[in-house]
Amino acid sequence: MTSSDKLESRQPETIVVTSVETLKSAFRQWAGEQARETADREAMLDEAAVRHRLGKSHATLWRWNKSGYLTFHKVGGRNCYRLSDIKRIEGGKADLGNT
């Protein structure tokens, strides 16, 4: 018997008594938090869309990733880029590569 087994056997069972309204309210709050987290997730573009949008080649995107200027994230085995990073580059930041 390990120390965690001893600890678990000493803990009493806990019973929580609550009203249906309290439970509904807690669920609504949790659901709202989940919706906000989902909305906050960053929109991503795949490499083909980024190449088209920026007018750059695969080699340029590869160099930018290597230098840290525009990093990609693997999503389902594909290179995807954050929309906010693409907008940053479109906004006039220094161009580090050629097409």
Image: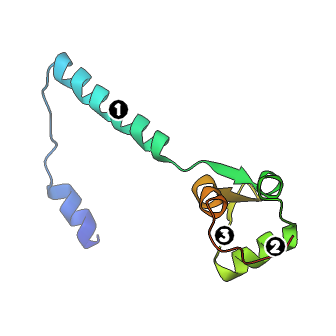
Q: How is the image coloured?
A: rainbow
Location of the N terminus by quadrant is: bottom left
Q: Nearer the viewer, residue 77 or 63?
A: 63
Q: Residue furthest top?
A: 20
| Location of residue 98 (image quadrant) | bottom right
Residue furthest bottom as drawn: 67
SS at mark 3 in the image:
loop
The percent position of residue 58, horizontal first and vertical second, equals: 86, 67
Earlier sequence position, callout 2 versus callout 1: 1
Q: Looking at the picture, how far across and down is residue 46, in whole percent?
A: 75, 53
What kind of residue is marked 2? Thr
CA gap, disc 3 and disc 1:
33 Å
Q: CA distance from mark 2 to mark 1?
A: 41 Å
Mark 3 or 1, nearer chain start:
1
Residue holding disc 3: 70
Q: Quadrant of residue 96?
A: bottom right
Of labels 2 and 3, earlier in sequence is 2
Q: Quadrant of residue 65?
A: bottom right
Q: At 35% across and 32% down in the image, what residue appears?
A: 32
Amino acid at circle 3: Leu
| Residue carrying label 2 | 60
